[in-house]
Amino acid sequence: MRRNATDNQYKRTIWLCAIRVAANLVMLAAVCVAMYQSYLNPASSLSVFCQYFFGITIVTWTVARFACSRIRMVYADADEGLVRLPGHKKYSLVHWKVAESSLCVQRPTQIAL
């Protein structure tokens, strides 16, 4: 079954929005967990809050970024493709834009005064 380009674009948009919403919900939960843990340890509440909040935040957005890149590769547009660029070990998603071909290039002539 061949996928339509607009079908890929629609699915990619839905998945990317779902990943961002889920990451933001995890961030909201991270604030709640960090506040609760800092409440339990009032002597060092700032450091406990920062440890829990940034610990959850860094992991969440790293996973979200990786998931978004995977979704962009799986649901690529018709004019996108994976290319191995020189000097890189892994494939990169490249957007192809084909320009109109011209038979000759004309230079502007100088105006004689």
Image: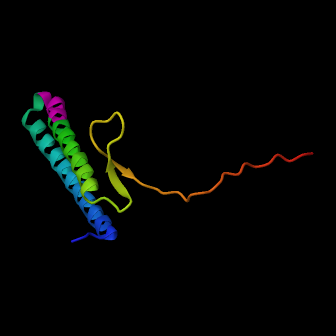
Q: Residue at x 28, y 55 (%)?
A: 72
Magenta stretch: give its range.
Answer: 44-51
Report the number of numbered marks: 0
Magenta span includes 45: yes
Residue 38's place in the image compared with 101, above or below, is: above
**Colour scheme employed for the rendering of this structure:** rainbow
Dividing the picture into quadrants, the one containing residue 61 is top left
Quadrant (top left, top right, bottom left, bottom right) of the C terminus? top right
Quadrant of residue 17 within the rendered picture: bottom left
Q: Residue 90, percent across and down?
A: 27, 40
Residue at the spot 14% in from the left edge and 37% down from the top edge: 52
Residue 48 pos. (x, y %): 14, 32
Seen as rendered, the residue at the extreme right is: 113
Examine the rendered structure and indicate whether residue 16 appears above or below residue 10: above
Describe residue 34's horizontal placement relative to residue 94 as left or right: left
Quarter in which the N terminus is drawn: bottom left
Q: Is residue 103 magenta?
A: no
- Give the dominant element type of the magenta stretch: helix, strand or loop: helix
Q: Position of residue 75 (x, y in %)?
A: 27, 60
Q: Is residue 93 shown left or right of residue 67? A: right
Q: Which of 33 and 27 is in front in this view?
A: 27
Kindly give the residue lying farthest to the front in the view shown.
103
Please, which residue is most extreme toward the left here?
40
Residue at image point 33% right, 69% down: 6
Q: In the image, residue 112 lies at what x, y percent?
A: 89, 46
